[in-house]
Image (tube, coloured by chain):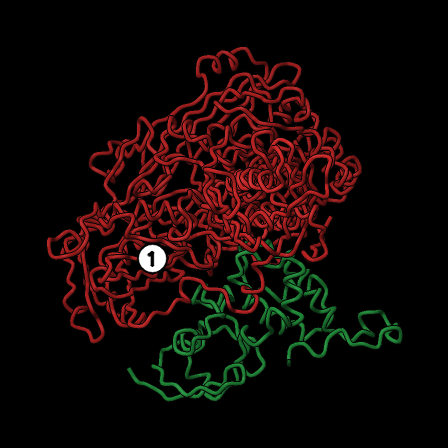
Amino acid sequence: MTEHDITLTVNGAEHDLTVESRTLLVHALRDELGYTGTNVGCESSICGACTVRMDGEAVKSCTALAVQADGAEIRTVEDLGTRHDFHPIQEGFQEEHGLQCGYCTPGMMMTALDVLEENPDPTREEIREGLEGNLCRCTGYQNIVNAVQNAAEQMQPAAVADGGEADDDPTPATDGGEER
Amino acid sequence: MTVESVDPGDVDAADILGSAIERREDPALLTGNAEYTDDIQIDGMLHMAVVRSQYGHAELGDVDTSEAEAMDGVHGVYTYEDLTSDETPGAGSFALPTAWLLDSLKQVEHPVLASDRVRHQGDGIAVVVAEDRYTARDAAGAVDVEYERLDAVVHPSDAFAEDAEQIHDDAEGNVAFDWEIGDADKTADAFADASHTASIDLENQLLIANAMEPRAAVADYNPGTDELDVAMTTQNPHVHRLLMAGVIGHPEHKLSVRAPDVGGGFGSKIHHYADEALVAWCSMMHEAPVKWTATRSETYLTDAPGRGHETKAEIAMDDDGNIVGLRVDTKANMGAYLSTFAPAVPTYLYGTLLSGQYDIPAIYGHVKGAFTNVPPVDAYRGAGRPEASFLVERLVHLGAKEMGMDPVAFRRQNFVPDDAFPYETQVAVVYDSGEYEKPMDEALEMLDYENFREEQEQARNEGKYLGVGFSCYIEACGLAPSELAGQLGAQAGLWESSLVRMHPSGTVTAYCGTSGHGQGHGTTYAQIVANELGIPYDDVEVVEGDTDEIPQGMGTYGSRSAAVGGSSLVKSAQKVVEKGKQIAAHQLEADPDDIEFENGQYSVAGAPDRSLSMADVAGQAYLAHDIPDDMEPGLEETSFYDPDNFVFPFGTHAAIVEVDPDSGEIEIERYVAVDDVGNQINPKIVEGQIHGGIAQGVGQALYEGAEYDENATLLTGSMQDYAVPKAEHIPEMETESTVTPSPHNPLGVKGVGEAGTIAAPQAIVNAVADALEPFGVDHVDMPMDAESVWSAVQDNATADGGSDEPAAGTGDDPDAAADDGGER
């Protein structure tokens, strides 16, 4: 099996590693580099549990090859926030009970960030459509939709969230969410 | 109504029980710090892969492992003969046991690797141990297996056919068991005397649980101590330990089983599977840690599917619309072998619920279990109870139609009345408490039912077919007591064990023998214990899912955790309070009978300034400088709580659908759920469980089903082919609850984990039948995909003379159909 020397930048940290041609990105992240927050659900791109962001795009790491990610910037759930300083998307899932077993949650959040980046103020319908590539078996999705809405409200500038009455509350709802 | 979650810091200690506080489990899960089984990495760890049968049924010829053994990185390749040879560790049965025995049960051998014949696609033939997961799978692919294919059987009715292929030599006619409940003669008499009957012929399809986390196990044998530690995807570590000890022949006290974070179970992680025993054995064989993680394809081939019934049933009414009899004949698919608790599912968990919410004076149920060439069938969310509730609620729908009655009025007339509890059914159970009209009334109000009927009529006039369907379900959970379970064939007790340990500083660790996998036990149990002890919620830590930490336990399934595990915690905490009272009385120089305990304070009656806090008492218990004579130091208590009876949650779910008869497409316009699960420890968690359950029920109604071809080859072997619902497939759910506490446990709780799944399918099928009433369609088997709905309309049109317009007598005049009312 041919091996390749590649470089992955994961959550800002650069890693040099050697992988086989067939090594999946998710296995490189989990088994080689120890970023086990990203989960494997189906190995066929359907369930989305393994979704990470690669150069700013949501990517299913169970069907991407590690060599394809050579030189890329990867962002995983480990980079979102800590329990004492949640990212708004984590805050949304916590407040809205948007998770139960939590297995789909890292991938769900990475996709949700993608959805919110494209559309900062989505309707419930648009959130459901945006999450079509991520399966959850526990929540029935309703609280996940609530969670994404909650995050959207936190991440929007106060002007939008407050319907134009931003002057009353000059504090932005978030200091920038995803890029922190 | 949406329950708003609250920060635990904002809840008064006295209100902690019943508050919708945010889950303490979430931060680890939200930050990538959770530890699922496949996350575990141990130095020197090897990986196992399983060689699985390609065929549903075949004699095994030569299994050539030489090429696999010669591969770089391969440490061993083993077949059944290797497991049982003198050269290898363990002296177990290497056969998976069945832990629920019925009188008529035909027990068959279920070796962990096939010895001479494979009986379902995915049946294990050999295992490979290699340096990494890729090499292990390569090597598994290099094992050359000779098969001599045999005819296969998929459906129970085929299994019982006269010339059916025999799956086990010693199970004649493929009959696993022949079981009955109720009174056949009395029921026959009731039908003979009845003025009206309605019948149904249905299939309740096989479903695959599809927990998002595939099954996995990491075994770590220590040759120095002879201890074997297994971390695995389990809902019941102690039961797995006991069963595994026998299978691999390693003593129970030298074996530990731990559930790390578990990514959903829905029943599929209760049962003991071959892979788990094999990975443990491989670890002993190699004296090294070994990991096995299923691919999603493997989970489709080997996770126990649920349901799988073929049923003929009928309901009998008198002239006044009173149900007088119910008769059921079911052929249940058991699959290729008898999985751990499988025999209980289509018998005691199904037949005992055939009375539904109704006062039915004569019931008879007959169930025959069939061996087939699908994977062993076992509990999946609800387990037996969804099949019963689906059947009863479909029959009630048809009974109302037969009587020309509104389905709501028909149900209401036949409900077990409020003053009849405890109510003993004709099928061997006693319902604890119920007020069945309350959730029904609430649901009707939410639906604005009367208005809906007008709207429906209007819509029909415009060629738009709306329907409403009801599901007045009941379920039995918290299975108990152990003595009864034993009489019914359980090879396990159904108590739950807990330990409440106060630390000297006054904080607490609470241990429980249940094992949650997404239900939020860490939160709800802490609420229970904090409430009993009157201490801050944040001062309670909860430990579950580890045989090394928790003395004993039965696990989490059948919605038993709050009712049985939670009650056990109450008992243990009460014992702690009682011992603390003795210490407080001693130190306050008062009679123990004069000590009052409230809000975490012990005080002398009438002298509130003479008091000690729970934390003070805990400290004194460990100092032991001044405790009563003969009292042992320390403050921790254990209980083995064995409930008096099951608990019986109930509720009314209702769906409004629009069906397009030209395309067969179904749109769920509204979904309303009113559940009564008794007292609620955490309403936010209750709501979440209801949502998730409904989604799985919607999945069964509209999308999901395991399908096999005539060779028993799985056609729905990936998420591409098996339709796990996506976010856009699930409707917005409108939920409310009523509260009828159970008198059978100290918390007054019932159970919630399975309610939605039990309730939803028949609400939707009844709604579709209601919508298609003008076309004379009164049943469509699940999953009701567009083709099956369209076909039902077409078939009926053909029967009525070739028109797919509404059937004669109703459809020519849509008003007439609407006038006599709806769901029928």
Q: In this view, does B667 lie to the left or right of A162?
A: left
Residue B402 coordinates in the image, percent (x, y): 62, 24
Residue nearest the viewer, comparing A16 with B733: A16
Residue positioned 60% across, 29% down in the render: B743
Tell me where residue A70 sits by quadrant.
bottom left
Q: How crowded is mark 1: few (under 14 residues within 10 Å), some or many (20 or more)?
A: many
Residue B275 coordinates in the image, percent (x, y): 30, 55
Q: What residue type is labelled 1?
A: Val
Residue positioned 44% across, 83% down in the render: A68
In the rendering, what colour is chain A? green
Circle 1 sits in a helix, a strand or a loop, which is it? strand
Residue B739 coordinates in the image, percent (x, y): 68, 36
Tell me where residue B61 sits by quadrant.
bottom left
Eyeballing the image, is B344 above or below B505?
Answer: above
Residue nearest the viewer, comparing B729 with B273: B273
Eyeballing the image, is B201 above or below A143?
Answer: above
Residue positioned 46% across, 85% down in the render: A8
Tell me where residue B136 sits by quadrant.
bottom left
Q: Is residue B653 visible?
A: no
In the rendering, what colour is chain B? red
Residue positioned 28% across, 57% down in the render: B228
Q: Can residue B81 be seen in this view?
A: yes
Name the subunit of mark 1: B
Q: In this view, does B106 lie to the left or right of B567?
A: left
Residue nearest the viewer, comparing B108 with A38: A38
Q: Report the residue marked by disc 1.
A: B230
Q: In the current view of this chain or complex, which residue is farthest to the left?
A: B86
Eyeballing the image, is B275 above or below B817?
Answer: below
Residue B266 coordinates in the image, percent (x, y): 48, 48
How many numbered badges does the structure rendering display? Answer: 1
Q: Quadrant of the C terminus of chain B?
A: top right
